[in-house]
């Protein structure tokens, strides 16, 4: 049976084209209908034009539709993939990031955690809830996947309000292990088994082994990490950063807790009250500026996106193998998904959305228990539980008072008066998106 795959936010920089390009490469999903949806007419038209061009060029057996109406797009959907933002992404992000610092709150990055992560959540979660409300009415059996940040708080709010929805959060960060471990261990990634988990953008590699011998690979990793990452040169969109960039906090966590973090300072630093003192701020700013430039100049040259449609280039978007696995009942293990905890990490409460491996088959996405998760690292994760829960309550109850409580629960916030003034400032600046908070 051919499937109907709806991309919500298809006009956003690389999400729409990247996902379509990977679907084109899938033999299992041939014959499907890709439905492009965005509320930005110009962006939607641009994405549809490029998609149709490469569909014809590569003679791909898929149908393409484009709809400004979400209700039309969702009709008969089997899979819904959400990747949206609200307003001027970078203008608002910089408010989330820099304004708390003006009030003396030492926040890092400001996209997912800390006060900035809460403001981002309060803007983006209500429209995602509206999308999910439509899905529950129009295509309630669809599998729903979200790429939007802040992943932890979006997924927790959605799964709290719509517990019956087949909703999973996906993030690219686990791909860092595929980039680093083969070179570090001098063996192909196909010979490396891994387990990793925690909270999204705040997770660690818990196990690693050599598949050919069954030998534990972690002693080799712990020996080689310092030298490997000290000399590792980050690249972004063809531009090179300094060796070891964004590894100040990364190394601090590795040295203190003896586990390899999945991501770097920009994301890790959002969750820890002492992160500002050790994070590589120069590296974080360098990454942000390059990322902003890429996103805001994405359509300037065809070379920017033509690789997405090169049929000889491997898939990049993890959602496509997952859809294949559900459609064809492949029953394989996916390395990282974001789902409500059901004893998968024993030290965290059930219901909090965590990042763990999962089985993928006709039943969808089923999380796996991470055995022997380090209690020492889980204590850091526990500091975020109340922040996530209170953010959900503030949004669902539309309560400014609870939003302040969520700020005060955050380990990054250390001053009540500053938190009150910060919240008032952001509610005023971002009133078009936050006026529901009373």
Image (cartoon, rainbow, N blue to C red):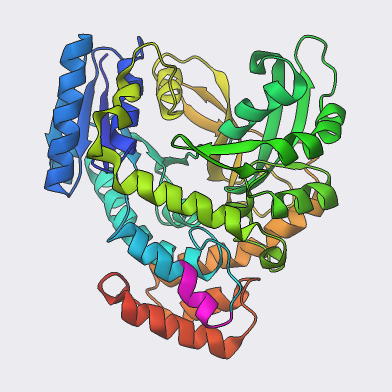
Is 385 located above or below residue 368 in the figure? below
Q: Main secondary structure of the magenta part?
A: helix
- Dividing the picture into quadrants, the one containing residue 388 is bottom right
**Left or right: 71 with respect to 124?**
left
> What span is colored magenta in the figure?
97-104
Is residue 8 visible from the viewing direction of this image?
yes
- Quick one: 242 or 436, which is closer to the camera? 242
> In the rendering, at what x and y percent does residue 256 appear?
84, 52
> In the rendering, at what x and y percent does residue 193 appear?
71, 21
- Quick one: 71 or 208, which is closer to the camera? 208
> In the rendering, at what x and y percent does residue 354 appear?
59, 47
- Quick one: 242 or 312, which is closer to the camera? 242
**Left or right: 347 with respect to 424?**
right
| Residue shown at 40% from the left, 72% from the top | 397
Count every numbered label the image shows and give the total. 0
- Quick one: 176 or 326, which is closer to the camera? 176
The C terminus sits in image quarter: bottom left
| Residue shown at 37% from the left, 59% from the top | 125
> In the rendering, at what x and y percent does residue 6 appear?
26, 33
| Residue shown at 20% from the left, 44% from the top | 38
């Amino acid at each position: 049976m051919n499937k109907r795959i709806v991309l919500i936010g298809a006009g956003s920089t690389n999400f729409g084209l990247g996902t379509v390009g990977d679907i084109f490469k899938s033999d299992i999903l041939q014959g499907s209908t890709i439905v492009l949806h965005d509320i930005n007419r110009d962006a939607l038209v641009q994405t549809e034009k490029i998609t149709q061009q490469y569909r014809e060029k590569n003679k791909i057996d898929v149908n393409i539709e484009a709809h400004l109406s979400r209700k039309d797009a969702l009709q008969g959907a089997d899979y819904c993939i959400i990747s949206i933002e609200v307003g001027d992404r970078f203008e608002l992000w910089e408010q989330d990031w820099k304004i708390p610092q003006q009030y003396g709150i030492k926040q890092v990055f400001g996209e997912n955690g800390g006060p900035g992560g809460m403001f981002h959540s309060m803007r983006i979660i209500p429209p995602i809830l509206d999308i999910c409300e439509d899905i529950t009415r129009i295509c309630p059996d669809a599998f729903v996947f979200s790429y939007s940040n802040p992943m932890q708080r979006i997924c927790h709010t959605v799964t709290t309000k719509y517990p019956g929805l087949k909703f999973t959060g996906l993030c690219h960060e686990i791909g860092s292990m595929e980039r680093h471990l083969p070179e570090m261990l001098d063996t192909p990634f196909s010979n490396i088994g891994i387990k990793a988990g925690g909270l999204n953008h705040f997770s660690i590699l818990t196990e690693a082994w050599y598949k050919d011998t069954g030998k534990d690979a972690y002693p080799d990793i712990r020996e080689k990490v310092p030298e490997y990452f000290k000399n590792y040169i980050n690249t972004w969109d063809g531009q090179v950063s300094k060796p070891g960039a964004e590894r100040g906090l990364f190394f601090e966590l590795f040295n203190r807790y003896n586990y390899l973090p999945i991501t770097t300072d920009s994301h890790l630093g959002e969750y820890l009250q002492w992160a500002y003192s050790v994070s590589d701020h120069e590296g974080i700013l360098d990454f942000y500026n390059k990322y902003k430039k890429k996103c805001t100049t994405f359509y300037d040259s065809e070379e920017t996106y033509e690789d997405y449609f090169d049929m000889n280039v491997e898939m990049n978007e993890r959602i496509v193998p997952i859809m294949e696995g559900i459609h064809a009942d492949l029953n394989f293990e996916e390395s990282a998904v974001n789902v409500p905890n059901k004893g998968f990490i024993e030290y965290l409460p059930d219901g909090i959305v965590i990042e763990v491996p999962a089985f993928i088959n006709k039943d969808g996405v089923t999380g796996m228990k991470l055995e022997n998760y380090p209690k020492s690292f889980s204590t850091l994760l526990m500091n975020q539980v109340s922040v996530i829960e209170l953010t959900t309550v503030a949004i669902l109850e539309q309560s400014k008072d609870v939003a302040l409580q969520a700020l005060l629960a955050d380990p990054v916030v250390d001053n009540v008066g500053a938190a009150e003034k910060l919240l008032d400032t952001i509610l005023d600046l971002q009133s078009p998106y936050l006026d529901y908070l009373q």
